[in-house]
Image (spheres, grey):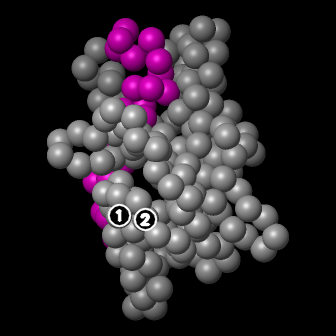
Amino acid sequence: MIGLLMRSVIFGLTLQLLLGVSGAWAGPPTDIVRQIIEKSLDIIQNPSYGRQEKQRKVRSIVDPHFDYQEMAKRSLGPNWGKLSPGQRQEFVALFSQLLEASYSDKIEKYAQRVKIDYTGEILSGDTVEVRTVVVKANDRMPLNYRLIHEGGTWKVYDVVFEGVSLVSNYRSQFSRIIHESGYAELVKRLKTKVSEITRAG
């Protein structure tokens, strides 16, 4: 269900948080990301931590700055309103597991191979887009964060990789599956995908 494009987007999501950056930051949203990067790099580059411990520690730093519920809600679109509170809670947990399972095994492998250039922030009400470019070898790939202001801080709710929104891609896929086979089938497929990626890692 998750194609090469979506894997690239999810990979890009993690790269932005975990790899070295260059350029000045424009305000609090970018500053928050910078803090996450510095703390995460300290962990990733610490040889005293094992692979699983590194993942656990990095996750504890990253998770508070991601609004998984907002991401899940937007990914389901109108179908979110049809879910019970219990179903919503289950879906958010499953959605966050899907993201983590899709990118966690790539963190250390690529940690030293790219850099991130900041190119600015675009503020719109209670949301902001932090624009960056992933620089790897001779490639320059636009990678933008969308953050929402809530609870007195900024949290990531979407990532746009080379003009393609992670949330929009998921919404398209999820809507098709729900339309063709129902919500229960979507949950079943997501659980299967998480299990497959976890075993492969």
What's drawn in magenta, residue-wise?
56-83
Q: Residue at x 71, y 56 (%)?
A: 141
Q: Residue 105's x, y, as percent? A: 57, 64
User: Between residues 38 and 131, which one lies in front from this camera angle?
Assistant: 131
Q: Is residue 110 above or below residue 76?
A: below
Q: Residue 184's x, y, as percent? A: 48, 17
Residue 46: quadrant of the picture: bottom left
Q: Which residue is mark 1?
A: 31
Q: Is residue 114 visible?
A: yes
Q: Which residue is mark 2?
A: 25
Q: Amino acid at mark 1?
A: Asp
Q: Residue at x 47, y 18 (%)?
A: 77
Q: Residue 75's x, y, as percent? A: 49, 27
- In the image, is residue 74 part of the stretch drawn in magenta? yes
* Label 1, label 2: how far apart the Cα atoms are: 6 Å
**Quadrant holding the C terminus:** bottom right
Q: Are marks 1 and 2 in contact (CB under 8 Å)?
A: yes
Residue 56: quadrant of the picture: bottom left
Q: Nearer the viewer, mark 1 or mark 2?
A: 2
Assign a secondary structure to mark 1.
helix
Q: Amino acid at mark 2?
A: Trp
Upstream in sequence: badge 1 or badge 2: 2
Q: Main secondary structure of the magenta part?
A: helix
Query: Quick one: label 1, few (<14), some, or many (20+) residues within 10 Å?
Result: few
Pick out the residue farthest to the left: 151
Q: Residue at x 56, y 59 (%)?
A: 119
Q: Is residue 172 above or below residue 54?
A: above
Q: Residue 177's x, y, as percent? A: 62, 17
